[in-house]
Image (tube, rainbow, N blue to C red):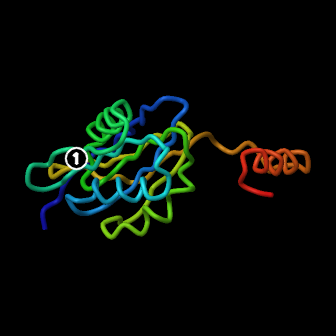
Amino acid sequence: MDEQTFSVKVINIEKPSDTNIILGQAHFIKTTEDLYEAMLNINSNAKFGIAFTESSGDCLIRVEGNDEELKNIAGKNALNLSCGHSFIIIIKDAYPVNFLNAIKNVPEVCGIYCATANDVEVVVAETEQGRGILGVIDGLKSKGIESKTDIEKRRKFLRKIGYKF
């Protein structure tokens, strides 16, 4: 058995502050079209860009979406990652929670690494063959356990944005 070496890199996802991302893994060239349809079927008013890293054949970044700026951002992030069969969706004017079940039900989708508005760092392994996502760092380190005041604040916020009655 041949031994291989690998390196580990941390790659920042670059996105506007008023956007969210969904980062996941899928497995087929039609992923971008199927994700596009899933997004539109949930919320046709949301703006988004999708990029998928093809990992065989031409090994191109496949890009779809309904907003040119977000498509470009998704494509640049996917190229920076260059991790086989990964996808990134950049979303504006909507929250990822509204799309997750539909995305998970797309037949090509294998899994979701994160869905967030936070700053994201992606931990990537690289070998001679290619790159793969090991995990993500989604936001900041925890500072403690919420107090009663924090609980009230969280609950008020959820009601303010329409997620609870």
Q: Amino acid at mark 1?
A: Arg
Q: Position of residue 54 (x, y in %)?
A: 20, 52
102 shown above or below 39 = below
Residue 136 in the image: state x and y as whole percent.
46, 48
User: In the image, 141: left or right of 111?
Assistant: right
SS class, disc 1:
strand
Q: Is residue 111 above or below residue 53?
A: below
* 155 sits left or right of 49 in the view: right
Q: Which residue shows up at 55% across the image and 45% down it?
A: 94
Residue under numbered circle 1: 62
In the image, 61 versus 123, the foreground residue is: 61
**Residue 79 drawn at (x, y percent):** 26, 38
Q: Is residue 26 above or below residue 21?
A: below
**Is 6 in front, or is 69?**
69
**Farthest-out residue, left:** 57
Q: Quadrant of residue 104?
A: bottom left
